[in-house]
Image (tube, rainbow, N blue to C red):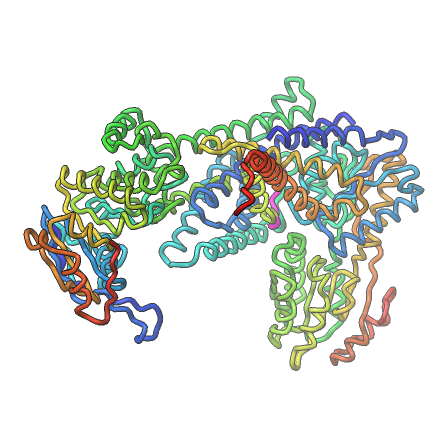
Amino acid sequence: MKKNLMILAALTLSCFSLVSCNSASKTIGVLKIGSFDALNNAETGFVKGLENAGFVNGKNITLKSDNANGDGATNTAMAQTLASSCDMVLGISTTSATALKAAVDAVGNAIPVLFTAATDPVGARLIKSMDKPGGNVTGTSDLGPIEAEINLLKNFSAIDTVAFLYTQSESNSVVQLKIAQPLIEKAGWTFLSKPVTAANEISSAVSSLSSDVDVLLIPTDNTIAENMANVKAGNEARTGHPLIVAGCDSGMINGSVIAMGVDYYKLGVQTGAMAGKILNGIKPADIPAEYNTDAVIKVNQTWATSLGISIPSTITSAQGVEII
Amino acid sequence: MYFEWLNFFFSPISNGLIFVLLALGVFIAFRVLDIADLSVEGLFPMITVLTCYLIRQGWNPFLAVLLCLLIGAFTGALNACLSLYLKIPPLLSGIIMMSATLSFALVFIYYNGGSPSLLGGYPTLFNWLSASLIGAGLSTFWGTILSKIIVVGMIVALVMFFLYFFFGTELGLAIRATGKNKQMARANGLSVKRMTIIGLSLSSAAVALAASLYAQASLGGTAQDGQGMIVIGLSIIFLGEAILPHQSFKRHLLAIFGGSFIYWYIIQILMKLMDYIPGGSNYLTLWKALLLVLVLAVPYLILQAKKSRANKKEEENDAPMPESL
Amino acid sequence: MLRCQNLYKTFHPDGNPLNDKKALQGVSLTIHDNDFIAVIGGNGSGKTTLLNCIAGVHRPDRGSMILDDIDLRDYKEHERAKWIGRVFQDPLQGTIADISLFENLALASKRGEKASPFRWALSRAKKEEFQTLLKPLGLGLEDRLDAKIGSFSGGQRQSVTLLMATMRTPKLLLLDEHTAALDPKTAKTVMELTIQIVSTHHIPTLMITHNMKDAIAYGNRLIMMKEGRIVFDCAGDEKKGLTIETLLKKFAEDESVEAESIL
């Protein structure tokens, strides 16, 4: 037992000696809950956004990137470490941002906390409101352009039921469901909630929807975004009534008929720009939180035609539409 | 720099204390009762989400913890009954409870419109104390961390005393006996059913307590909170047993207590080392596994080396074989 | 007194009726209060099944078991433990290795009572009581109350199990080849301890043994089982006059049974 305590002590002491304190460049700590395409893109975008503002990793800033590997306890511990060792932190996902804010509050140093890929930062009580965040937190929300997408769908004729496909355990998707449901019902359509628990259920969930369902609405959901191929397969397996798949992440175009909105890379760039402003002296309380500004609308004409779905010209000839 | 080292030394203490409770719960099921109870992975998030949900609805945090404790006990009893009365293999009944509790967590998240967060001033078991400490002049850092260490520390002390005394009673001894040798237990008039139900209730209650405190310490509850919790609990138990003496029941409890801090300090060191490895924390899970193997294997290997050295010495002293044979 | 009437028990290991094992085929047996019965028989003759039915491990398909005026069928295995003490063949089975001798004895001392969360399992008074119990064994165990039973030898453990089974004088003692796993010297010690305890406390005993010498030497009655039935039952003087040759002949009377002799 003594030997082990000695080893532990030796490791600890060696950590002391390895740390170099460079107070000239600011340290920015980045914490993401796990490795997902969306979150990884956001991180890459963040670095680019900082570069655009003149801050380069290794030159005038130091970036520390941490991945919690999906483990909540690790997420908390990493947040505590970053909060106590950095000048500014970024949380990619609501869970990481929440942990960072809690950790920063616990340390009491009130360093700026940025968030990205957090769908409902006001509901998660990261900020008071999108326009006036108040406090030391601001950032970008990846809330999908649900209202805009539903308005776009109104261009299609004869829609009866809209099914909402989401991963049950993703809190952000639940947030978007609560937004989508009243909007869909107001448009005079029937709302159908279709939860899945894992990627391998997606294909059969899509193919087993009844023929009353005309549209499949997909929020910005990490698991589904990574498995659009399953959505595609499921839709193609349907006999006789293919669905108009509408995704709220423009990266979802492979497997969607229409995909609009959140481009996580661009969201990251927006966040990086905010970080740049903060480094230049502007307080986070004075920087309003943002949604994805570049609302790209992508239309997958090729797939739609192969499914036998005709897309109204009001959509295809609209502004800013990218047709594949 | 200053905060970095303070955090390095003190956050494993505050994290470690909460996880002692988790490890004790896992210990009661896996070691005392000899039951592989997988329900922890679902029970943990159900309780973290429920705790946050209740506090957001205005519940007193102390009452919320109490309710979660009772719900945890109930879950454990239900788990036991599934395997005892319906003859479902215990491993499977644990998995069934895991799914059931996880579903409840998802239901609460659905009704809350997202994972419930306790940020921004909701009352917790800790912030009344941190508020007074800070009011008395301590810095925010010290106020917050000391409030966690004191409150959780008191709860852990209470629980450990309770377990030590409980397992020294007739009922406690009976439960331990049932876990070790069911046949002998029955031959001595013990009802295996009664012992298992009480034992698993205790186990799940401890896990629920840990979860409720965890939710209030990290100010939020998500459906993913349970991921990896059994592994952490078991790692703490194995680490404690590998490094600290545990012949008597009392020592065993203390070994788990120590094991939790050892685990968290190891994680803290690992996270620091990640800064110097390319690819860093993306491989954290791999490094965690490797380090655990190291910490568990080293005492064993040292023991083996000692044994073989002692044997070699004996060989030198043995009389040589006569040539004629 | 235990009165077993017409006990039948068939085991069905799988759905195939050809593989059914008819362990007991109409066993009737009365054990009187002063009986010490040695039970012998080949493998598969039903001896252990009989013991297990009485103990409550198995439920007989048909037949009754009345202990004094208690119908055993109304009680589960652990409920019967109030009245029935057992010692198993495997020294590891009757005690718990990981806990101390003191704790094992404490468990046994509460056999039949509900384990309470409000009483300590161990106490100074109990320690003294156990020391008094252990001294007469002459094994020095009274000084090792705090040692874990895992460190004891097989003979010591069987002696302890014997003590545990008789600590709260049971109405019936069941011994399932309890010396079979011990070396001859230790086996003799344990047998003599058995006789001593049983005669001091007047406990009716049913002892399964493979050792025909023991079966003849100990006890007032001898029963031989074959294929789930009792084929031979003798007591008193007739039993005293038995020889091993007589028994072997009885064994061989049916070709379907292999005779065993551990002399």
Res. C205 in view: yes
Q: How many labels does the image show?
A: 0
Residue B202 placement, left or right of C45 = right
User: Image check: A218 left or right of B191?
Assistant: right
- In the orientation shown, which residue stands out farthest toward the top? B136
Task: Provide the major secondary structure of the magenta segment.
Answer: loop
Between B174 and B100, the one lying in front of the other is: B174
**Residue B242 percent across, percent down from the top left:** 56, 37
Which region shows up in magenta?
B217-224
**Looking at the image, which residue is at 21% across and 65% down?**
C24
In the picture shown, does residue A313 fall above or below C67? below
**Which residue is painted at 62% across and 50% down in the image?**
B224
In the displayed structure, would residue C183 be above or below residue A297? above
Residue B230 horizontal/vertical position (percent)? 56, 46
Q: State the residue in front, A314 or A301.
A: A301
Q: A132 or C194, which is in the foreground?
A: C194
- On the image, the x and y values in percent for residue A95 come to 68, 45
